[in-house]
Image: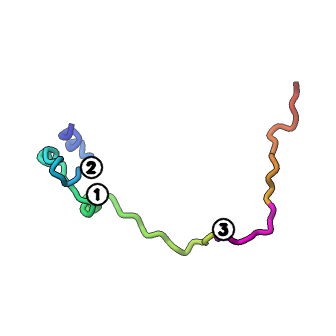
Amino acid sequence: MAKRVLAARIPIFTSDQEDNKALHHLGIPGLTRSSVGDYLEKLGGHRPKPIDERHDKKVLNDLTLEIENKSQKFVQGKFNF
C-alpha cells in the first residue's frame, strides 16, 4: 500500500520514531514537528498569512439602548381547515 501511495505522489510522512523504521525503508520520510512545514512547502503548500489586527473590535461590555425585537415571525398568516 505504501508503495502505491508513493507512486501516486500523495504527500505522506510519518513521525521520526523507531516504530516507523519499516516505513522509512519503503521511502516514506520521517519528519519532526519542526521539519514537517518545510516538507509541505516543498510540495507546494504555504504557511498562513498573519492576521490583520486592524479590523473593528466588538466590545461586549458596552450597553446598547436598542431594544431587540424578539417577537415570533409567522410564515403563514392563517390556517384553513
Residue shown at 24% from the left, 50% from the top: 13
> Cα distance, mark 3 to mark 2?
44 Å
Q: Amino acid at mark 1?
A: Leu
Q: Nearer the viewer, residue 67 or 5?
A: 67
* Quadrant including the N terminus: top left
Residue type, label 3: Leu
Q: Quadrant of residue 45?
A: bottom left
Q: Image quadrant for the C terminus? A: top right
Q: Report the span colored magenta.
A: 59-67
Tell me whether circle 3 and circle 1 mark residues in contact (CB < 8 Å).
no
Question: What residue is disc 1 on?
Answer: 40
Q: From the viewer's perspective, is the residue at label 3 or at label 2 nearer?
A: 3
In terms of depth relative to the viewer, which is nearer, 20 or 81?
20
Q: Is residue 46 left or right of residue 65?
A: left
Magenta stretch secondary structure, dominant: loop
Q: What is the C-alpha distance between the residues marked 3 and 1?
A: 40 Å
Residue type (three-letter) at the residue carrying disc 2: Pro
- Kindly identify which residue carries mark 2: 11
Image location of residue 58, percent across then percent down:
63, 69
Q: Position of residue 53 (x, y in %)?
A: 52, 73
Which of the numbered marks, if any, corresponds to residue 17? none
